[in-house]
């Protein structure tokens, strides 16, 4: 897919797509099919409430609470719901544990399946042709695109989200974080580390 | 269907380009397109598999030339046009020209949180036992249906191993056609990179797909 970088335009310079969306919203509102207040709330929810901070809390809890970690890896959906995250595009969540021997990476080659309740909406690159094509064939090449490598001896398992199971990676806890509390640990957990295209931040990166 | 959306393993020379601190939306129209798509699910009455098919069922040049939310928009317009909810002349005119069709439900602001929290679970009570168990060898069937399917081309015909049994789930191939949920056992199937890509493959690569029982045969 092309990745146009659209910019906000003033009224004199609306693209066909912008005009089309505006037309549709007008028609749907006039016909009573949509409530503009509901649209605003949907946008606000995914811009400010649901995002990778949710997943970071799940990971930090798993790093500090062995019983929680066990529940998360056994049955992800209820364990994640314990922290209040559930619902659309996260009805059936499976957590994947990274180890020194195994690195997990998540993709959706057919569209854009992604665990919304814990990560929010997927980034453009996750939905892009280069990622969707390359992740299953050359995942180490993808990791290089992200600026890092893992040892050649580390096995890579790529999870293609072809059904309604949503996958989230439980990354390895960085060394040098002994005694850190959950809140502090959550600061280390990046979105990409929960997709498998990144690693958590190191302690010195968060000061 | 076989289409440009089925991208696994397709050669693509561009690198993956992460955007630092990427926002969820890159333009106001993307926000609105996202929101009307979610909100129209209720009055529209279609299911997620119908939505996916409406997005992917287009000639490859069309699919590949559209940005992600442009595809969503095109899919939404198609679903609405098929059901007589919004006609093309109305989109051209920019406002309603025909009376609204009665719809059973709409999404109110008060209903947003509950709708999102409910989501759309797909697991159903099984009608019978699962055919395969963890560790069984299976071959992904060689199928090329003209209708919606979730078996990616790159695994078709290849042999893998059942890695997990995920329960019995709504079968997209049936649900997308409006032919009922026809729930089927769902498995995570692990394939060796060498089996899928041949001897050029990374020897330490394993790929999993989630596959419904009708996609699989014993190997």
Image: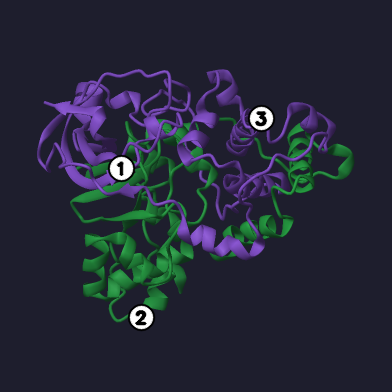
Chain colours: A green, B purple
Q: Name the residue beneath numbered marker 2.
A: A181
Is the residue A37 above or below the residue B188 in the image?
A: below
Does the residue at mark 2 contact the one at mark 3 (Cβ under 8 Å)?
A: no
Q: Is residue B88 left or right of residue B162?
A: right
Q: Name the residue beneath numbered marker 3.
A: B81
Q: Quadrant of residue A10?
A: top right
Q: Chain of mark 2?
A: A
Q: Is residue B50 left or right of residue B217?
A: right
Q: Name the residue beneath numbered marker 1.
A: A159
Which of the two labelled residues, at mark 2 and mark 1, occupies the earlier sequence position?
A: 1
Q: Residue B130 appears at what percent x and percent y?
A: 16, 41
* Nearer the camera: disc 1 or disc 3: 3
Is the residue A16 above or below the residue A64 in the image?
A: above
Q: Residue A9 appears at what percent x and percent y?
A: 81, 44
Residue at image position (34%, 55%) is: A93
Q: Nearer the viewer, residue A33 or B30?
A: A33
Q: Chain of mark 3?
A: B
Q: Is residue B83 left or right of residue A106?
A: right
* Nearer the camera: disc 2 or disc 1: 1
The reply to whether residue B139 is visible in this rendering is yes
Q: Determine the secondary structure under disc 2.
A: loop
Disc 2 to disc 1, how far (Cα)?
31 Å
Residue at image position (39%, 72%) is: A83
Q: Is residue B114 left or right of residue B97?
A: left
Is the residue B208 above or below the residue B122 in the image?
A: above
Residue at image position (38%, 41%) is: A107
Does the residue at mark 2 contact the one at mark 1 (Cβ under 8 Å)?
A: no
Do tags 2 and 3 sit on the same chain? no
């Amino acid at each position: 897919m092309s990745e146009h970088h659209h910019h906000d335009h003033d009224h004199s310079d609306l693209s066909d797509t912008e005009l089309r969306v505006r037309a549709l919203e007008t028609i749907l509102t006039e016909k009573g099919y949509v409530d503009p207040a509901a649209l605003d709330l949907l946008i606000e929810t995914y811009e400010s409430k649901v995002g990778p901070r949710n997943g970071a809390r799940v990971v930090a809890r798993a790093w500090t609470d062995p019983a929680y970690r066990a529940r998360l890896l056994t049955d992800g959906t209820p364990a994640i719901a314990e922290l209040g995250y559930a619902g659309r595009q996260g009805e059936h969540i499976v957590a994947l544990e990274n180890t020194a021997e195994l690195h997990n990476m998540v993709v959706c080659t057919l569209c854009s399946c992604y665990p919304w309740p814990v990560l929010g909406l997927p980034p453009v690159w996750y939905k892009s042709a280069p990622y969707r094509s390359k992740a299953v064939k050359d995942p180490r090449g993808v990791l290089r695109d992200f600026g890092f490598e893992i040892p050649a001896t580390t096995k890579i398992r790529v999870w293609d989200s072809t059904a309604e199971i949503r996958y989230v990676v439980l990354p390895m806890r960085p060394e040098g974080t002994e005694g850190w509390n959950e809140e502090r640990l959550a600061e280390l957990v990046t979105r990409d580390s929960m997709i498998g295209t990144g690693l958590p931040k190191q302690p010195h990166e968060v000061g | 269907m076989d289409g440009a959306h089925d991208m696994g393993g397709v050669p693509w020379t561009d690198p993956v380009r992460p955007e630092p601190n990427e926002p969820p939306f890159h333009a106001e129209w993307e926000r609105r397109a996202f929101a009307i798509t979610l909100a129209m699910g209720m009055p529209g009455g279609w299911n997620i598999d119908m939505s996916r098919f409406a997005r992917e069922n287009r000639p490859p040049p069309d699919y590949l030339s559209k940005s992600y939310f442009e595809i969503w928009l095109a899919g939404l317009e198609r679903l609405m046009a098929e059901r007589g909810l919004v006609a093309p002349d109305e989109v051209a005119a920019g406002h309603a020209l025909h009376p609204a069709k009665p719809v059973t439900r709409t999404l109110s602001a008060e209903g947003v949180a509950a709708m999102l929290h409910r989501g759309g679970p797909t697991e159903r009570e099984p009608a019978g036992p699962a055919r395969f168990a963890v560790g069984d060898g299976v071959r992904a069937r060689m199928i090329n249906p003209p209708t919606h399917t979730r078996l990616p081309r790159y695994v078709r015909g290849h042999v893998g191993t059942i890695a997990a049994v995920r329960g019995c789930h709504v079968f997209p191939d049936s649900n997308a056609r409006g032919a009922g949920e026809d729930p089927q056992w769902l498995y995570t199937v692990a394939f060796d990179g060498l089996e899928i890509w041949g001897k050029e493959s990374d020897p330490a690569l394993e790929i999993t797909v989630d596959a419904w029982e009708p996609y699989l045969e014993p190997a």
